[in-house]
Image (cartoon, grey):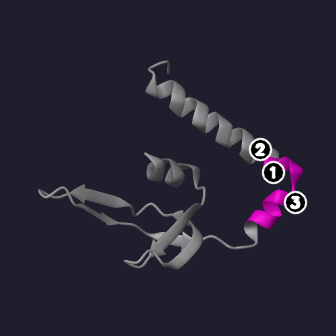
């Protein structure tokens, strides 16, 4: 659900890839493109394909510098969380 929501809303997600010893080798913001698919095999392993586009580092500086844009994004986030919570309990 999280990935599908991020795709529809076109919001960036933090992608962190680590080594076996949990040392980060990738830590970036990215948007998830429409090419996401997954399946679960007989062993219960998740096999997936995902296409990411790196989100520009300076983009959040732009958002934070604009009170109107920051306010709009904040409202959308609250509405999205509220809608999901209401949906889970069957109210919408």
Q: Does 4 sit above or below residue 62? A: above
Badge number at residue 72: 2
Front-most of 25 and 92? 25
The local crowd at label 3, few if under 14, some if 14 to 19, many if 20 or more residues have their Cα within 10 Å, is: few
Q: Position of residue 20 (x, y in %)?
A: 37, 77
What residue lies at 87% left-to-right and 56% top-to-bottom?
A: 66
Distance of label 2 from label 3 (alpha carbons): 13 Å
Front-most of 7 and 17? 17
What residue lies at 60% left-to-right and 31% top-to-bottom?
A: 82
Magenta stretch holds residue 61: yes
Residue under label 3: 65
Task: Please name the predominant secondary structure of the magenta segment in the image.
Answer: helix
Mark 3 or mark 2, which is nearer the start of the sequence?
Answer: 3
Q: Position of residue 33 (x, y in %)?
A: 48, 63
Left or right, residue 57 beside residue 61: left
Q: Secondary structure at mark 3?
A: helix
């Amino acid at each position: 659900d999280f990935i599908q929501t991020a795709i529809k809303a076109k919001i960036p997600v933090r992608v962190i890839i680590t080594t076996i010893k949990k040392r980060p080798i990738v830590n970036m913001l990215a948007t998830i493109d429409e090419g996401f698919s997954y399946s679960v095999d007989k062993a219960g392993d998740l096999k997936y394909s995902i296409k990411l586009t790196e989100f520009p580092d300076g983009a959040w500086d732009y958002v934070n510098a604009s009170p109107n844009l920051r306010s709009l994004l904040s409202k959308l986030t609250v509405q999205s969380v509220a809608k999901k919570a209401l949906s889970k309990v069957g109210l919408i």
